[in-house]
């Protein structure tokens, strides 16, 4: 008996855009009931490939076979009708519609040829949510009111509302805490047990080992390896395939001793009711302090309150001993604070503007004379800042949206470097950044600290906090439960503290 053909087979797929060959003869096959992981640095072609699979892009050449039959995916609707659903990292939900309306958007339940609204749609949605292990999600609630993890569940329910046989998940764990990641993996295991295939994209290589069956690696628009066993392929080999070089998983060496001098940032009894309890914190020039904790522990809220984006309900923030006006971003920036936020595309970058304008935007007064902007001075200053951080490509006129995730983050850091900030607040600095670029960002942050910058770091990845920070504050439910030098902690100890710690005495 002839073997069953793959559920999906993509052969020789090419796709070019003006000046860029995004895919150059990519092959990918996916079996029913497997988790096939797609790896590659930013710009490797992953997004283009899944958009071809989703019907959003048409390949220039190549063939796609579905259950052994050649098909043409002319649109996302055509892909969905075959049973292919894609859940993008930036969820395409309508926030002003209810959960049920989002789940059935474009294929509302019908009876006798008429669209059935309300009760039938909610009942159908409730069944899907139950299947996904989330019966607590209210089908009638507006999607915009849900936390990120539940919005992702809604996207999965929408996929399952069709007769889906393959689901593409693009960085599905990026905004989830460890418990939510465990639930995601349980859902994936249940789906594959039913014969549904999953194409899983993630920068977190430890996830690939936990959830993956096989791995395909893309580099520069080519599949440099296909069908590797996810569990047994050494990490070093995967990284070398992705980057074209060996990348050691080591962080920059910490300086010996402890930073000296007066604190540049002092936080005294800082609190926000309902978000985090009174907090005391000092950071000296050249010191990196990390905040470790689960999503919802108050980490990001602390950073945003220090930056003035949220107004404290109690306490005081001082820079070089001078109190800041509470709830004022302008006052914080003038005092020397800079924030690289978690959602850099939405909260930090002007995506349609050039690299130069993104870097110079916080220091425009330096280039303004009598209402006119000295473009030459602006360009020169931005170029110097980006070159100091080795931002690539070295083209200040390029739209920042064309940069990889790691280089977009460098653009944000270059902005504060140009501004001459004293305290850098980093929230999830390597989210959506590939492994090669992560090492570069770690080196940049450590070098800036060695030059006297004070850094307050938040990351969901405990190894990142422990590897980069000098000192760590562990948070649980808005309270500091432990503080210690990073070298005295390990990942297991931190996880024990965030799950079962008690408020520090």
Image (cartoon, rainbow, N blue to C red):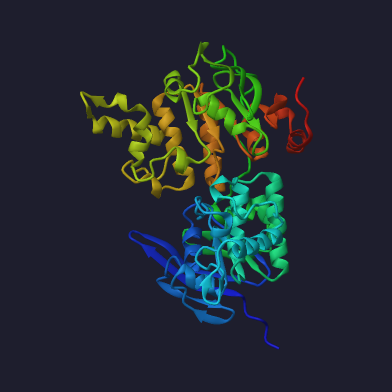
Q: Is residue 245 left or right of residue 176?
A: left
State the image coordinates of residue 286 (x, y, percent, origin top left). Answer: 55, 22
State the image coordinates of residue 290 (x, y, percent, origin top left). Answer: 63, 29
User: Looking at the figure, which quarter contains the C terminus?
Assistant: top right
The relative height of residue 4 versus residue 35 in the rendered view (above or below) is: below
The relative height of residue 181 versus residue 483 in the rendered view (above or below) is: below
Identity of the residue drawn at 53% across and 74% down? 81
The relative height of residue 223 versus residue 267 in the rendered view (above or below) is: below
Between residue 273 and residue 413, name the one nearer to us.
273
Q: Is residue 285 left or right of residue 486?
A: left
State the image coordinates of residue 495 (x, y, percent, origin top left). Answer: 74, 37
State the image coordinates of residue 121 (x, y, percent, origin top left). Answer: 59, 63
Identity of the residue drawn at 43% across and 28% down? 417
Identity of the residue drawn at 59% across and 14% down? 260
Q: Quadrant of residue 16?
A: bottom left
Identity of the residue drawn at 66% across and 72% down? 32
Q: Is residue 229 visible?
A: no
User: Looking at the figure, which quarter contains the N terminus?
Assistant: bottom right
Q: How many marks?
A: 0
Residue furthest out toward the bottom: 1
Q: Is residue 356 visible?
A: yes
Q: Quadrant of residue 414?
A: top left
Q: Quadrant of residue 272?
A: top right
């Amino acid at each position: 008996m002839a073997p069953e053909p793959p559920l999906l087979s993509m052969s020789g797929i090419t796709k070019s855009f003006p000046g860029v060959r995004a895919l150059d003869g990519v092959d990918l096959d996916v079996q029913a009931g497997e988790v096939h992981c797609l790896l590659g640095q930013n710009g490797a072609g992953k997004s283009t490939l899944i958009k071809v699979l989703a019907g959003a892009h048409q390949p220039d050449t190549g063939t796609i076979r579905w259950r052994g039959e050649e098909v043409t995916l002319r649109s996302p609707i055509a892909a969905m009708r075959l049973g292919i659903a894609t859940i993008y990292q930036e969820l395409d939900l309508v926030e002003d519609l209810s959960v049920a309306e989002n789940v059935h958007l474009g294929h509302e339940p019908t009876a006798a040829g008429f669209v059935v609204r309300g009760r039938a749609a909610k009942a159908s949605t409730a069944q899907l949510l139950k299947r996904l292990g989330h019966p607590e999600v209210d089908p009638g609630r507006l999607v915009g009111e849900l936390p990120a993890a539940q919005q992702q569940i809604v996207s999965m329910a929408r996929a399952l509302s069709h007769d889906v046989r393959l689901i593409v998940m693009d960085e599905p764990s990026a905004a989830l805490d460890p418990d939510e990641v465990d639930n995601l993996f349980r859902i994936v295991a249940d789906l594959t047990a039913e014969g549904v295939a999953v194409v899983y994209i993630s920068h977190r290589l430890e996830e690939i080992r936990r959830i993956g069956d096989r791995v395909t690696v893309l580099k520069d628009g080519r599949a440099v390896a296909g069908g590797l066993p996810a569990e047994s392929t050494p990490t070093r080999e995967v990284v070398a395939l992705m980057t074209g070089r060996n990348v050691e998983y080591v962080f920059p060496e910490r300086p010996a001793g402890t930073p000296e001098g007066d604190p540049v940032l002092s936080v005294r009894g800082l609190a926000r009711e309902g978000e985090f309890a009174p907090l005391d914190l000092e950071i000296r020039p050249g010191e990196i302090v990390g905040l470790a904790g689960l999503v919802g522990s108050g980490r990001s809220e602390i950073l945003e309150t220090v930056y003035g984006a949220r107004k404290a309900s109690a306490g005081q923030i001082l820079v070089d001993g001078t109190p800041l006006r509470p709830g004022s971003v302008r006052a914080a920036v003038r005092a020397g604070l800079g924030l690289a936020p978690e959602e850099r595309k939405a909260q930090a970058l002007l995506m349609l503007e050039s690299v130069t304008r993104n870097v110079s935007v916080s220091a425009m007064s330096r280039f303004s004379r009598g209402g006119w902007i000295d473009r030459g001075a602006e360009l020169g200053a931005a170029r110097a800042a980006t070159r100091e951080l080795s931002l690539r490509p070295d083209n200040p006129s390029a739209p920042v949206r064309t940069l990889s995730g790691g280089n977009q983050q460098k653009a944000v850091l270059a902005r504060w470097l140009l501004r001459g900030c004293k305290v850098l607040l980093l929230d999830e600095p390597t989210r959506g950044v590939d492994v090669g670029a992560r090492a570069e960002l770690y080196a940049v942050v450590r070098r800036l600290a060695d030059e006297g910058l004070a850094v307050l770091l938040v990351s969901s990845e405990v190894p990142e906090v422990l590897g980069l920070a000098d000192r760590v504050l562990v948070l649980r439910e808005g309270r500091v439960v432990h503080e210690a030098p990073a070298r005295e902690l390990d990942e297991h100890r931190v996880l024990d503290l965030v799950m079962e710690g008690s408020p520090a005495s």
